[in-house]
Amino acid sequence: MRHLLSRTALVAIAATFATESLATEWNVSLWGKRRAFTEHVEKLAELVSEKTNGEFTLNISYGGLSKNRENLDGISIGAFEMAQFCAGYHRDKNPSITVLELPFLGISSLEQEVEVSMALYDHPAVKEDLGRWNAIPIMPSPLPQYNLAGVGDKPESLDDFKGLTVRATGGIGQALTSVGAVPTSMSATEVRQAMDSGVVKAVAFAPHAHMSFGTIENATWWTTNLNPGTVNCPVVVNSDALDFLTDAEREALLSSVDEALEHYVDTYNSKTMAAWGPALEERNITQVTFGEDELASFRATAAPIAQTWIEENASRGLPAQELYDMVTAKIAETAK
């Protein structure tokens, strides 16, 4: 009997190990907390698990695996299999996708942002650029145009931005520099403290981030239509990890991207934006709307930034003009 039980136990243990060996788990590095900005990753995890009967899972970590500015480095060494990052955090590491962070490109919706981003990610130069980090972009994190929430005297003209310390990254920061503001780059999780301590007087964010990171808790004004641009924050996977998946697992992952993005856009449009107006009103935040003449002057002042981007990146061997032309053509094509 003891012999039989021993054999039975061994078979059970072997079966357990066999089952575990068939399961695939990926670690996913995000930051902050679950919010509109991460809903597509959450949905992707849900869909992948459903399609594989729980045998392929995405374990999502909010800051437990890496700092947000180090996610691309973590992907490059295989510290985790999937991550989200923003191009403006380290422009030198991913210059090809910073074209989408240039100011005043004219993207007007999240749906359009998805189409343009996915087209760019498919460009050979972008694949090669991110391939240096063993990174393959599978979907963007589309965001609406950024605007500023700030403290102190509200700006009533472009002249009022002179000397304004503002948290802004990428092309948004460059655009604000062009009108005399003093931008600084810091991670989203550091912004509230910087605002509270007076290190910055204003913060450039999309609406969800203003709510998630608490900038509207002490802001006294908000620009409704400055719209200098947005940031590009892809979700990438480690190329070796993607290759290691079975065909069925890879299909489950990649075939879920479109639905995950649809869920993200629906959530942002229907829930986040619906909550944004009441959040401002509840806090008595003054909404600052600029006239068309002021906005036209802002766009004209920032116009040379695109040409500078083209020249600087062309000198590094990137087909910068080609990327810029492709992006602007795609924006024109997808404009409603």
Image (cartoon, rainbow, N blue to C red):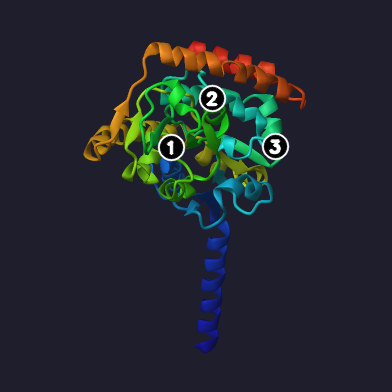
Q: How crowded is mark 3: few (under 14 residues within 10 Å), some or many (20 or more)?
A: some
Sequence order check: which comes first, mark 3 or mark 2?
3
The reply to whether callout 3 and callout 1 are in contact (CB within 8 Å) is: no
* Residue where numbered disc 3 is placed: 131
Q: Residues within 10 Å of mark 1 (few under 14, many from 20)?
A: many
Q: Residue 288 carries which label?
A: none
Q: Is residue 231 left or right of residue 218?
A: right
Q: Kindly tell me whether residue 314 is visible in this rendering.
A: yes
Sequence order check: which comes first, mark 3 or mark 1?
3
Tell me where residue 11 appears, x and y as whole percent.
54, 73
Q: Is residue 244 left or right of residue 172?
A: right
Q: Which mark is residue 202?
A: 1
Label 3 element class? helix
* Quarter of the view holding residue 14: bottom right
Tell me where residue 309 appears, x and y as whole percent.
66, 23
Name the amino acid, label 3.
Answer: Gly
* Residue where numbered disc 2 is placed: 175
Name the amino acid, label 1.
Answer: Ala
